[in-house]
């Protein structure tokens, strides 16, 4: 999952090797051709040796323990080294000036455009300032100014190139995550909500809004993935006519970007831009509608693109932000993303509908079979027992036994009829309550069979479809089976809750012997969880083993 703002486009181990080769090459060059450095030779040699040792240490760490250096800003440390080398040698005439291009390239392809541009600007300022102050000979104006211009110009090109590469990598990562999230087991609502949440996170936006016409009523509904309320992403809400008229005010073929911070700038750049998607050209300005939409969405800037189904406009996708900025590049990417996602959503919707129809048909078939093959014989048995009871007088010992047997038979008939009624009137909207009762029954049965007491805690706010509820039930059964087979525990606990758009299932058992053995991840649980796009972790502490399953909602 994409959970950070940068995606590295370079191999850190290769970069560290290049740094080491660069340092050793510099040592070799000045040894073979000692024309530079021409002053403080010993100190410069010492600095280069230290930089080579530093580069070798970085390479060693990336080979052995790469996670140690994951968040270390190595490009800024390199800038410091190069400034020291320039100050020790010939200032603005120093041969070490060319080292700056290496660090700009690394920063750009590792962390993106802004990092590369920052290193370029800082490097140019430090080169000019430190080089000017430490040049002991006469400054050559042509070399002084040309080197500064080269550094800024080529540095900007490298930053732009590296930023584009990083952006493409991040977008490919998002498409990969979207494919993973498009799982028929999740159902349509959960799939759309997960994709919207991923999209909001990718752009670091405040909200992601989906305005879409309902397939049955053709009335517009609103889905919202909000930074402050991530749990709302899987729920659809009605859209009032006034809000609908504002959010759907644009021409069907146009995408829109708006940035209120551009209003009133001296060069009068338009704050609202409309793009005709078929032609890719700027469309007729409708800037008067943008401020109203921005106020409605409480956003300084936003982007929206049209959504089509079979060539007909069916809604719009919005991203809003108070600090970000959207461009035509984002319009083009979002259009491609929607074109990629729409067929998958339609397929999931079809599978969802077919599964619901098949489930409904199967429930009715089961109810008829139970009525014909189970309830009717029990009714016949009850009538036979009533007939026998009428032949026996109340003072005979057999009378009480027949009466008790008839009452039990009548209770079984009521239970079967209640079960059949539940099959026929089943409402899939409240799967958490059904899952909770199913888990309670499973825990009770498990305790009776194996003398392992199981506590069940299901949060009331958990919301899921019937297929995900069935998968969770199977995960619990497999977890309890593992406790029975692999431990001597007599106590277990099952907890289920939803937090930040994720379903969290904990299967816990108390086993003092667990501390003596290495924990392992149950393969069956791991495979089933990964098929749902989730992850599994095992924690052993204080004699308790907790298998934590996290599944995106």
Image: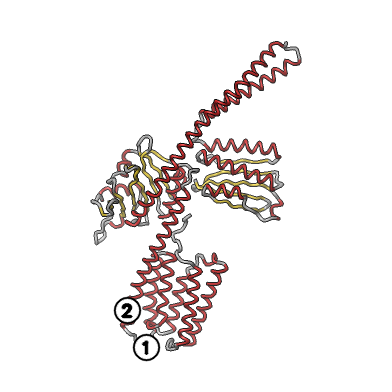
The residue that label 2 is drawn on is 146
Point out the frontmost of discs 1 and 2: 2
Location of residue 253 in the rendering, given as x and y in whole percent from the top left corner = 29, 47
The residue that label 1 is drawn on is 137
**Residue at position x 48%, y 35% in the image:** 356
Query: Could you say whether the residue bearing mark 2 is in a helix, strand or loop?
Result: helix
Instruction: Tell me the CA gap for discs 1 and 2.
Output: 18 Å
Location of residue 390 in the rendering, given as x and y in whole percent from the top left corner = 68, 11
Above-or-below relation of 221 to 36 = above
Q: Residues within 10 Å of mark 2 (few under 14, many from 20)?
A: few
Above-or-below relation of 311 to 107 = above
Residue furthest out toward the right: 397
Front-lying residue, 318 or 281:
281
Location of residue 89 in the rendering, given as x and y in whole percent from the top left corner = 43, 84
- The answer to whether residue 465 is visible is yes
- The answer to whether residue 274 is visible is no
Above-or-below relation of 466 to 47 = above
The picture quadrant where one finds residue 128 is bottom left
Front-lying residue, 480 or 238:
480
Location of residue 105 in the rendering, given as x and y in whole percent from the top left corner = 41, 70
Q: Is residue 340 left or right of residue 403?
A: left
**Residue at position x 66%, y 15% in the image:** 386
Front-lying residue, 291 or 281:
281
Q: Residues within 10 Å of mark 1 (few under 14, many from 20)?
A: few
């Amino acid at each position: 999952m994409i959970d950070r703002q940068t995606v590295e486009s370079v191999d850190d181990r290769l970069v560290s090797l290049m740094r080491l080769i660069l340092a050793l090459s510099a040592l070799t060059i000045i040894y073979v051709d000692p024309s530079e450095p021409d002053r403080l030779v010993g100190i410069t040699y010492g600095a280069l040796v230290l930089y080579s040792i530093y580069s070798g240490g970085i390479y060693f760490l990336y080979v052995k323990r790469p996670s140690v250096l994951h968040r270390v800003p190595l490009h800024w440390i390199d800038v410091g080294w190069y400034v020291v080398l320039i100050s020790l040698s010939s200032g603005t005439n120093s041969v070490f000036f060319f080292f700056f291009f290496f660090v700009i390239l690394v920063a750009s392809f590792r962390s993106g455009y802004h990092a590369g541009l920052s290193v370029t600007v800082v490097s140019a300022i430090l080169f000019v300032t430190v080089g000017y102050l430490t040049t002991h000979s006469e400054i050559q104006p042509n070399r002084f100014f040309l080197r500064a211009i080269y550094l800024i110009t080529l540095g900007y090109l490298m930053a732009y190139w590296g930023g584009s590469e990083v952006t493409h990598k991040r977008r490919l990562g998002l498409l990969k995550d979207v494919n993973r999230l498009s799982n028929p087991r999740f159902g349509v609502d959960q799939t759309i909500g997960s994709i919207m949440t991923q999209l909001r996170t990718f752009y670091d936006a405040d909200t992601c809004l989906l305005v879409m016409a309902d397939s049955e009523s053709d009335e517009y509904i609103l889905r919202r993935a909000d930074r402050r309320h991530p749990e709302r992403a899987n729920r659809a809400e009605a859209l009032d006519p006034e809000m609908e008229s504002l959010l759907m005010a644009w021409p069907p073929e146009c995408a829109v970007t708006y940035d209120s911070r551009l209003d009133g700038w001296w060069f009068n750049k338009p704050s609202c831009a409309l793009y005709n998607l078929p032609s890719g050209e700027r469309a007729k300005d409708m800037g008067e509608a943008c401020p109203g939409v921005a106020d409605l969405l409480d956003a300084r800037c936003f982007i929206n693109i049209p959504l089509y189904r079979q060539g007909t406009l069916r809604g719009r996708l919005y991203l809003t932000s108070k600090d970000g900025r959207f461009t035509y590049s984002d319009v083009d990417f979002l259009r491609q993303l929607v074109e990629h996602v729409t067929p998958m959503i339609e397929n999931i919707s079809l599978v969802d509908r077919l599964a619901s129809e098949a489930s409904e048909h199967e429930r009715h078939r089961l109810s008829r079979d139970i009525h014909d093959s189970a309830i009717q014989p029990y009714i016949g048995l009850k009538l036979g027992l009533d007939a026998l009871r009428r032949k026996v007088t109340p003072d005979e010992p057999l009378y009480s036994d027949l009466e008790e047997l008839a009452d039990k038979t009548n209770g079984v008939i009521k239970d079967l009829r209640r079960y059949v009624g539940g099959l026929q009137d089943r409402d899939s909207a409240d799967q958490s309550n059904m899952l909770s009762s199913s888990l309670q029954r499973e825990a009770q049965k498990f305790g009776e069979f194996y003398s392992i007491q199981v506590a069940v805690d299901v949060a009331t706010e958990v919301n899921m479809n019937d297929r995900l509820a069935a998968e969770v039930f199977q995960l619990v059964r497999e977890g309890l089976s593992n406790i029975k087979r692999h431990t001597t525990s007599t106590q277990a606990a099952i907890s289920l809750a939803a937090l930040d758009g994720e379903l969290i299932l904990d299967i816990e058992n108390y086993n003092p012997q667990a501390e003596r053995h290495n924990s392992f991840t149950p393969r069956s649980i791991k495979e089933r969880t990964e098929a749902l796009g989730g992850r599994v972790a095992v924690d052993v502490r204080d004699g308790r083993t907790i298998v934590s399953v996290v599944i995106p909602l």
